[in-house]
Image: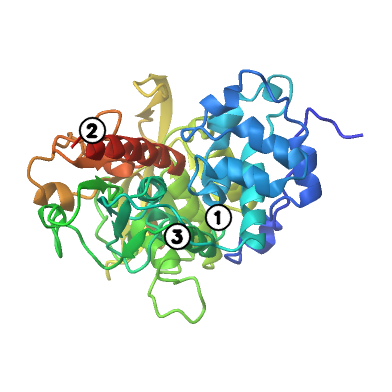
Amino acid sequence: MMDITKRNPMPNQDPLVRNKNFKEVALGYDAETAVAEAKRCLNCKNKPCVSGCPVNIYIPEFIAYVAAGEFEKAYEVISRTSALPAVCGRVCPQEKQCESKCVRGIKGEAVSIGRLERFVADYHNANAEISKSDIQKNGKKVAVIGSGPSSLTCAGDLAKKGYDVTVFEALHIAGGVLVYGIPEFRLPKAIVAREVEGLKAAGVEFKTNVVVGKSISIDDIFNDFDSVFIGSGAGLPRFMGIEGENLKGVYSANEFLTRINLMKAYKEDSRTPVQRGKRVAVVGGGNVAMDAARSAIRLGADKVYVIYRRSLEEIPARAEEVEHAIEETIEFKTLTNPIRIVGDEDKNVCGIECVKMELGEPDESGRRRPSVVKGSEHIIDVDCVIMAIGTSPNPLIKATTAGLEVNSRGGIVTDETGKTSREGVFAGGDAVTGAATVIKAMGAGKAAAIAIDEYIKSK
């Protein structure tokens, strides 16, 4: 008899097989397992899980349909509020959001909400055709800058309201961070492409290879559109400012992952250059650091280290990603911080000098503040260093747009609806907050769509 306090495990590729390929790690529930997991849901009267979802998916309702084997009806429920269910089911930190509120988790393990969302979306995508929208247009036009999760959500919600929406994307493929930042083994690009095709069928137009701020300005856009949403993301990488960051073999995680994901450097016949280091150090502890480290091992590295200045208990990456990385033989050097990247006479990376750290009292983030242990300098032998310590919003749009207020971190200043200091311009996602989660960006896009609708109707 099944122990209902335990969640149904997700089948995965074997760690020592998957760390040599870029195929998806998690294999997904089958129908029988999905139904069994859905039946663990208590269908709580107060629905606390919904409050933990930034886009307020009607979670108990869709799970009830899964439990009854009504998978298409479950998809209809999810798609009322989420534009990207197949994406969110894979990359959202449910353990910190909806699943953290699950009542079943009080005396056992929370219902696997994310895994069920993924199952429902995959079932729909495998069995349903994309059909064109028959929504009546209202004659109003909205421009969306960028095609990441906040932009796709905003565009989809506005299309449902009858707006003509055009998305301007700087790259040659739509999807933003979903295609350039998240590796194939976590989020297959065919899934992102399917979501984009669904938006096209809903009437959203995509214009790629358009760099707003260079090839066209927001002033130009306003000649043809009633409102603008900026969802241009946070693509400006940060570095530590330490000696040796300009050596050959030092990457930002953004560049490293873009070469692998968007430019397909992981393929054997790819012409995209990328360093296939044999001993790789990844500096940072977020999901991007995990993606970079796990990509490096798949490119053939003999040893990959994740260097993080706090303890493993305080690492910000998803627990599942850390667990997968450890299973894939990646070594975590916690309570360790780089102070210098060492180069040889040809200016190639040959090591990274670090110091040990110890934790003191919590800082403003609630995590214990690290400090240097004197005399703990040591060098780790590596030939490639990847900096994954965060990103900032792209400065191009703010530099070319008059009347757009930004904060000290480069983020566009908005109110809770996404309204900026310039009339008719709204913003959301990483362009406002700096690097955050996909689902939070989607929540911002959803809020902005509501505000844009109200703004245009009030004109």
Q: Is residue 363 found left or right of 31 in the rendered image?
A: left
Relative vertical location of residue 318 with respect to residue 5 in this rendering, above or below: below
Task: Give the amino acid type for the residue marked by disc 3 in the picture.
Answer: Val
Secondary structure beneath label 2:
loop
Of 279 and 221, nearer the camera is 221
- Asked where in the image residue 115 lies, by quadrant, the reply is top right
Q: Is residue 396 found left or right of 267 in the rendered image?
A: left
The residue sitting at 60% across, 66% down in the picture is 21
The residue sitting at 39% across, 39% down in the picture is 446
Task: Give the amino acid type for the residue marked by disc 1 in the picture.
Answer: Arg
Q: CA distance from mark 3 to mark 1?
A: 18 Å
Q: CA distance from mark 2 to mark 3?
A: 27 Å
Residue position for label 2: 414
Of 422 and 362, nearer the camera is 422
Q: CA distance from mark 1 to mark 2?
A: 32 Å
Q: Residues within 10 Å of mark 2 (few under 14, many from 20)?
A: many
- Asked where in the image residue 25 lies, by quadrant, the reply is bottom right
Residue 180 can be seen, yes or no: yes
Instruction: State the residue lying farthest toward the right.
Output: 1
Residue 323 can be seen, yes or no: no
Secondary structure beneath label 1:
loop
Q: Nearer the viewer, mark 2 or mark 3?
A: 3
Image position, residue 435 (x, y; %):
35, 42
Q: Quadrant of the N terminus?
A: top right
Residue position for label 1: 186
Residue position for label 3: 196
Q: Quadrant of the C terminus?
A: top left
Image position, residue 186 (x, y; %):
55, 55
Task: Give the amino acid type for the residue marked by disc 2 in the picture.
Answer: Thr
The residue sitting at 51% across, 67% down in the picture is 299
Of 397 and 241, nearer the camera is 397
